[in-house]
């Protein structure tokens, strides 16, 4: 058979039928720790809604320290797949030192450096929720667009059973997901984001709750409305006190 120069290389570049019909991977490998992976062929700055990634490290011979400071606006939810222990720091503050909870997920916001020290095997699925995706959910829930970047929660392990179950569905999705895979991921992610907004609102409302006596409903409504209108920025106790018409003085107790 006669061959021509360059034919082999061109043939190698030509996609086969299997390549054309092969479904895209739902969960991508996380090559660099806590850096959102980009699908093959997509530009590095391509927008995304939700990205699922898997990070795995085998037990190191000696403690393995890693740092991340990537310019990504996503909230990250880390779902552990195996029992493990580690040290984890976010924005210079220690979040955990020791064994991780297997009934909880680690949630962190965007834009802060992080550092970890691995001493055991660690295997997890990471859920990247983009600002555009969260803003879309915010608008659907509250009826108006956010006024700035959304930041939900301080970094911590969240043991909410609804969040855990929804994250588990995403972490254990089939590798290719089938024809409806992306739709399934999108639907579960919307439910997950909605739950996070609900929990964030409840947490903020708790700041103005008086344990000795319940707030009158009209005061509570004022506080909730204020929180929902300012969800994209830090809210301080003094603001909520003023909105609800409460004093900032703590109750006097006797022992």
Image (cartoon, grey):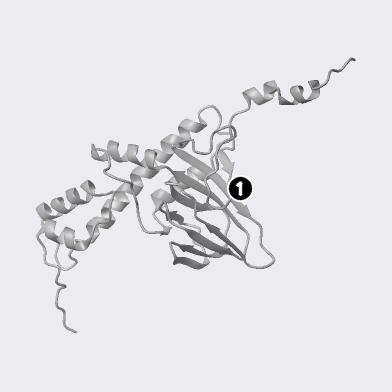
Q: Is residue 175 above or below residue 212?
A: above
The answer to which quarter of the image holds residue 175 is top right
Seen at 75% across and 22% down, the residue is: 10
**Residue sticking out furthest to the front:** 5
Q: Nearer the viewer, residue 215 or 135?
A: 135
**Residue sticking out furthest to the bottom:** 255
Q: Quadrant of the C terminus?
A: bottom left
Q: Is residue 4 left or right of residue 89?
A: right
Residue 38 at what x, y percent from top left? 55, 39
Q: How many marks?
A: 1
Circle 1: element type: loop
Seen at 54% across and 27% down, the residue is: 179
Seen at 46% across and 49% down, the residue is: 71
Residue 63 at what x, y percent from top left? 63, 67
Q: Residues within 10 Å of mark 1 (few under 14, many from 20)?
A: few
Q: Nearer the viewer, residue 21 or 43?
A: 43
Residue 64 at what x, y percent from top left? 62, 64
**Circle 1 sits on which residue?**
31
Q: Is residue 254 above or below residue 189?
A: below
Q: Quadrant of the N terminus?
A: top right
Q: Nearer the viewer, residue 230 or 203?
A: 230
**Residue sticking out furthest to the right:** 1
Residue 59 at what x, y percent from top left? 66, 61
Q: Is residue 218 left or right of residue 20?
A: left
Seen at 11% across and 55% down, the residue is: 219
């Amino acid at each position: 058979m006669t061959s021509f120069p360059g034919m082999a290389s061109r043939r190698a570049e030509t996609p086969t039928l299997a390549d054309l019909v092969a479904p895209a991977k739902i969960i991508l490998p996380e090559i660099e720790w806590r850096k959102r992976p980009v699908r093959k062929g997509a530009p590095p700055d391509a927008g995304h809604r939700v990205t699922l990634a898997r990070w795995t490290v085998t037990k190191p011979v000696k403690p393995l320290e890693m740092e991340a400071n990537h310019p990504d606006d996503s909230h990250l939810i880390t779902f552990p797949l195996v029992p493990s222990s580690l040290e984890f720091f976010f924005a210079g503050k220690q979040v955990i030192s020791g064994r991780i909870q297997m009934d909880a997920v680690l949630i962190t916001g965007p834009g802060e450096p992080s550092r970890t020290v691995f001493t055991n095997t660690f295997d997890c699925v990471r859920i990247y929720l983009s600002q555009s995706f969260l803003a879309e959910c915010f608008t659907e829930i509250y009826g108006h667009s956010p006024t700035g970047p959304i930041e939900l929660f301080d970094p911590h392990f969240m043991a909410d059973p609804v969040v855990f179950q929804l994250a588990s569905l995403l972490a254990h999705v089939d590798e290719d997901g089938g024809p409806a895979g992306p739709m399934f991921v999108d639907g579960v992610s919307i439910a997950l984001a909605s739950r996070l907004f609900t929990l964030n609102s409840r947490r903020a409302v708790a700041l103005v709750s008086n344990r000795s006596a319940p707030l009158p409903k009209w005061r509570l409504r004022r506080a909730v409305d204020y929180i929902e209108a300012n969800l994209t920025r830090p809210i301080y106790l003094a603001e909520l006190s003023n909105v609800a018409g409460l004093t900032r003085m703590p109750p006097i107790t006797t022992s």
